[in-house]
Image (tube, helix red, strand yellow):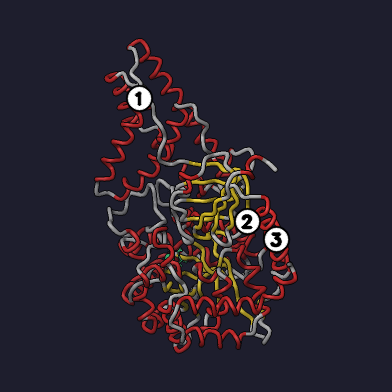
Amino acid sequence: MTDRTNKKEEIIQGVAASPGVAHGEVFVIHQRDLEIPVLELESTFIPREIERFERTLVETRKEIMRVRNEVAERLGEGEAKIFDAHLLVLEDTALIDETIRQVQDTHYNVEHCYAEVAQRYIEVFAALDDEYIKERMTDIRDVTRRVLQNLLGQSAQNLYELTSERVVASEDVSPSDAAQLEGSKVIAVVTDAGSRTSHAVIMARSLKIPAVVGLHDITKRLASGDYVLVDGYDGTVIINPGEETLFRYGRLKQERLNIQKAFEKSSLMPAKTQDGVTFKVCGNIGGPEECGAVLANGGEGVGLYRTESLFIGADKFPTEEEQYQAYRRTVEAIQPHPIVIRTLDLGGDKMVSSLNYTQDEENPFMGFRAIRFCLEHTDIFKDQLRAILRASAFGDVSIMYPMISSVEELIQANRVLEEAKEELRHRHAAFDENVRVGSMIEIPGAALVADLLAEHCDFFSVGTNDLIQYLLAVDRVNDRIAHLYQPNHPAVIRTLSQLMAVARKKNIPVGVCGEMAADPIYVPLLFGLGADTISVAPTSLPEIKYLLRRMNFKEAQALAKKVAGLTDPEAIFMALSAFYAQNMGDLFKDEE
Ligand code: PEP
Ligand code: MG
C-alpha cells in the first residue's frame, strides 16, 4: 500500500456538474491569495529591481502569446480573444509607470508595489459606474496574478502546460482557464464556487471532463500534490481515497464506460420509441467546430447556436461580414440538418470584457441583457440579423431571440428583422425569405403570455437554465443556494405543462434547450408533457437517444400526467428516477 492510501479518507459533497469518475494528483489554482513579501531595498538595488520588473513583463507577454496561439489553434480565434484583452492590460502604461514610480519613491520591492497599484486600480474601478470597466477587473486580476507569479519565480499556471494528468482545484473556472481545458491534461475539475449551468461548466461537460462544483472551500482543504477521487455523477470529492474506494470506483468507472459505449454504438439510429414515435434530438453549440460532435453523437441538427463566443473577449463588435463568415461555416458544417441561430445573449454570466456598451448594474441577470441590449442597439442587432439572414441562403436556418419578456419586445425584434431583410433585398443579397423565427421562453412572464407570443413567431424554445432561476428566484451561478435550484419543483413542472398545452393549442412547435433536457431523468417528462424536440450538449445525446428508443411514448405521457399532479419535489424526483431505472435498469444490470 502506498503512503497516500494510509491517510484518512475524507468525503466532501458538492454539486455534480459534469459526469465521470477521475482520480489523481491535485493541482490547485489559487486565484486570490498570493503571498507577497514586503521588502525594503537599498537605493543601489532600485535600478535592478525596475529592470527585473521590465524583464518579467516581457516574459509574461511571451507567455500570454503562447497560450493565446495555442488556444487559437485548438479552439479558433473567437475563444482566443480573451488573451488579446489580457495583453492590453499587461501593456497598460499607467499601471507600469505607476509601479515604477512607487518602487523609486518607496524603495519597496516591485512585487509589493505592483500588487498595490493593481489593487488600487481594481478598487477604483469597482466604485465606478461603468460596466465595461467592471468587466475588465477580471482581466486585471488574471494578468496581475500572472505577473506576480513570474516575479516571485512561481511556475505559471497555464492549464495546457500541465505535463501530467491532474485534477484541477480552483475557486472558480475563469474564462481563460475554461478556454484552455480542451486538449489539456486536466482530468477533472473541482471548484469552491460555480453551478451546473455556468458556461465554464457547460464547456467541461461538452469535453467529457468530470466536474464537481459548489464545494465552498475545497481550495483551502487541498494542496497541490494531494490525491483525490472525483465522482462527477454524485458530486462527491474523496480526499485520500483508500484502496477499497479506488476499487469500488474503478468498477463503477468501467461499468459506466461500458454503458457509455453501448449508448454510443447506437447513437446514429433514430430516436424511435417502442410504440413507434420518432423524436428529433439536436445539439447545442458555440461555434462551427462543434458541429462534428453533434453529428458524431447522433444529433439531427443544432437546436441552439450560442453566438456569444464571437463577442466575448473581442475588443470591438464583429462586423456583419465577420459574423456572416462564421455563421455560414456553421450552417454548412451541419448540412443537411437544420440549425437554430440565437441572437446575442450578452449579460448575466456571459460577460463581455471589452465592449464599452453596458452600464453598471446591481442585478446583471435581471438587467440590460440579451434582447433588451439588442433592441437599444439596433445597429449591432441588425448587423447580426443580416449576417444570419445571409447565412440562411446556405441551409435550413431559423433565428431565435433570447430573453423575450413581452409581446412588444417580440414585435419590435421582428420589426428590426424586417428592416434587415429589406436592406438585404436592396443590396440584392441572397437569403431565405421564409426563415423561421423563434422566441426563447426563459422568463416566467413570457411563459404566461405564450398564447400571445405564439401569434408573432414560428416556434418556442424553452431555456430552462434561466426559466428555473427566475421562476424560483435562485441565482443559477450561486453555490450557496444550488440546492434550491430544482427542475423537479412543482412550479417548474406546472409552468412547462401549461406552456406545452398552449403551444399545442396554438399549433406551434416547442423545443427545450436548457440543461434540464440534458439530464436523462427529465427527458421522458419533457416529451410526455408535449415537447417536440430537445437540444443538448452533444455528449449527452447518446444516452438520451438510447433511453428514447427503449421507452414507450404512451408511458411517458402517463408519467407526465402523474408527475404534474405531484406536489413534493422529492416525490417528483423519485417518480422520474423510477421511470428511468425501469427503462434502463437491465442495461445497468448487464454491466454488474
Ligand atoms: C437557458 O437559459 O436555458 C439557455 C439555454 O440559455 P443560456 O444557458 O445560454 O442562458
Ligand atoms: Mg438563457
Q: Which numbered dot is residue 534?
A: none
Q: Which numbered mark, 3 or 2, is in the foreground of this view? A: 2
Q: Position of residue 508 (x, y in %)?
A: 48, 83
Kind of element beneath mark 1:
loop
Image quadrant, ligand 1:
bottom left
- Which is more toward the observer, 303 or 414? 303
Please identify the quadrant where the N terminus is shown. top right
- Which is more toward the observer, 216 or 380? 216
Q: Which numbered dot is residue 257?
A: 3
Write the residue at 73% across / 67% down: 592
Query: What residue would you read off at disc 2?
Result: 21
Kind of element beneath mark 3:
helix
CA distance for labels 1 and 3: 52 Å
- Image side of residue 173 versus residue 6, left or right: left
Give, as a three-letter code, the residue at label 1.
Answer: Val
Q: Position of residue 329 (x, y in %)?
A: 57, 58
CA distance for labels 2 and 1: 43 Å
Above or below, 152 against 218 in this view is: above
Kind of element beneath mark 2:
strand
Which of the 4 image quadrants contains residue 279? bottom right
Above or below, 519 against 125 in this view is: below
Query: What residue would you read off at disc 1?
Result: 38
CA distance for labels 3 and 2: 10 Å
Give, as a three-letter code, the residue at label 2.
Answer: Val
- Image side of residue 458 versus residue 280, left or right: left
Ligand 1 under 8 Å from disc 1 Cβ: no
**Is mark 3 in CB contact (under 8 Å) with mark 2?**
no
